Amino acid sequence: MLGQNEAPLPFFFVGKTVTTQRINRFLQTKHVALSEQLGKPDTKSVWYSREHVSKLLDEIDRAGADGLRIYFGTYGEEEVYPGQTCLLMVMTKYDQEKCRRSDITIEDSCDFQARSIDSSKPRDFNVGSPCPPICDGLDE
């Protein structure tokens, strides 16, 4: 029985056992292949601050988005984590004409120029801290 201030877990909660199994499966298979191809340890996880997630949720509301698609990407050779896997979060909205969810391109919004610090750079949400190299004491 739930207490007065308690809420049931969300339906998408998978628990520690499933989470650990999936992480280990990735580390034993895909992470090995990616690291071998890269020639150094590839990204195992990406940490995002609460502030980052909160601002992302604000942008989802501002854009009238209905969700978020997370793409896997790779940093360029001239970037801070060359060749490493990164995550790119792109807002989505259901497109009635196409009968599917479509990505929202922030640069297409009417106030993008006014809100952008540097409008010459594409903007998706990618400001996490990849592990490695930033592992906060987690086993590398």
Image: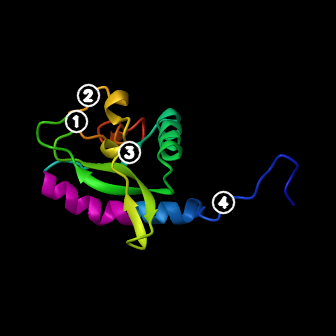
Within 10 Å of disc 2 (Cα), the crowding (few <14, some 14-19, many 20+) is few
Q: Nearer the viewer, residue 94 or 55?
A: 94
User: Which is in the foreground here, disc 3 or disc 2?
Assistant: 2
Q: Is residue 13 above or below residue 136?
A: below
Question: Disc 2 vs disc 1: Cβ atoms closer than 8 Å?
Answer: yes
| Magenta stretch, main secondary structure class | helix
Kindly identify the amino acid type of the residue bearing the numbered disc 3.
Answer: Val
Q: Which mark is residue 118?
A: 2
Residue bearing the label numbered 3:
46
User: Over which residues does the magenta segment extend?
Assistant: 25-38
Q: Is residue 96 above or below residue 137?
A: below
Question: Label 2 to label 4, Cα distance in Å?
Answer: 38 Å
Residue bearing the label numbered 4:
10
| Label 1 element class | loop
Question: Disc 3 vs disc 4: Cβ atoms closer than 8 Å?
Answer: no
Q: Nearer the viewer, residue 69 or 82?
A: 69
Q: Which mark is residue 121?
A: 1
User: Which is in the foreground here, disc 3 or disc 1?
Assistant: 1
Residue 67: image location, x then y, percent: 49, 56
Quadrant of the image for the C terminus? top left
Kindly identify the amino acid type of the residue bearing the numbered disc 1.
Answer: Lys
Q: Is residue 33 magenta?
A: yes
- Residue drawn at point x = 34 percent, y = 42 percent: 126
Which comes before the other along the chain, label 1 or label 4? 4
Question: Label 3 to label 2, Cα distance in Å?
Answer: 24 Å
Within 10 Å of disc 4 (Cα), the crowding (few <14, some 14-19, many 20+) is few
Question: Disc 1 vs disc 4: Cβ atoms closer than 8 Å?
Answer: no
Which comes before the other along the chain, label 3 or label 2? 3
Residue 65: image location, x then y, percent: 48, 53
User: Which is in the foreground here, disc 1 or disc 4?
Assistant: 1
| Label 4 element class | loop
